[in-house]
Image (spheres, rainbow, N blue to C red):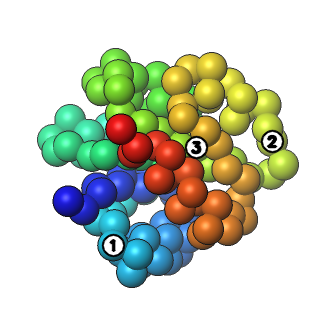
Amino acid sequence: MTTRILLIDDETEFVTTLAERLEIRGFSSTTAEDGEAGLALIRKQPFDVVILDLLMPGMNGLEALKQIRQISPKLPVILLTGHGSTREGMEGMRLGAVDYLMKPLAIEDLMEKLQEAVAP
């Protein structure tokens, strides 16, 4: 079975490239450009894991994470943070994220986190 990933990130070029790299590795990727769009997708279809950017205009990643927890409490979420900020990543884990990665990220690190997130 193909792992279904939802990528929520406002950086269009980054998220498009990441989706392509994940699909090459056998994952099914759906993208959303902001928290609201991501939440709408989660309400409509099942995903195995969410990769969520913390710093987005409008609804930030932490707020989106809180709402994801209400919609789908067991859905694994991996946070992405840039700007050298680990504080938000730690806060995200307190709110139920599986882990966080710093941007720019190495695809190998992400693959490792994805494997951990979807492991039974």
Left or right of 7 on screen, residue 41: left
Give the secondary structure at mark 2.
Answer: loop
Packing grade of label 1 (10 A; few <14, some 14-19, many >=20) is: few
Q: Which mark is residue 26?
A: 1
At numbered mark 1, what does the secondary structure look like: helix, strand or loop? Answer: loop
Q: Amino acid at mark 2?
A: Ser
Q: CA distance from mark 1 to mark 2?
A: 31 Å
The answer to whether residue 113 is above or below residue 111 is above
Mark 3 Cα shell of 10 Å, populated few (<14), some (14-19), many (≥20): many
**Residue 22 vertical position relative to residue 110 in the rendered view, above or below:** below
**How far apart are the two marked residues, 1 and 3, measured between alpha carbons?**
21 Å
| Residue 40 seen from this side | no
- As helix, strand or loop, the secondary structure at mark 3 comes to strand
User: Percent position (x, y) of residue 77?
Assistant: 47, 39
The spot of residue 3 in percent (x, y) is 30, 57
Numbered badge on residue 68: none
Please give the name of the residue rendered at 67% of the width and 68% of the height, measured from the top-left corner. Answer: 106
- Which of the marked residues, 3 or 2, is nearer the chain's N terminus? 3
Nearest the viewer among 57 and 51 is 51
Q: Amino acid at mark 3?
A: Leu
**x and y percent of residue 73 in the render?**
35, 22
Residue at the image position 61 percent from the left and 29 percent from the top = 92
Nearer the observer: mark 1 or 3; the answer is 1
**Is 119 situated left or right of 55 in this image?**
left
Of labels 1 and 2, earlier in sequence is: 1
Q: Which residue is mark 2?
A: 85
Q: CA distance from mark 3 to mark 2?
A: 12 Å
In the visual, does 62 lie left or right of 101?
left
Q: Nearer the viewer, residue 42 or 35?
A: 42
Circle 3 sits on which residue? 79
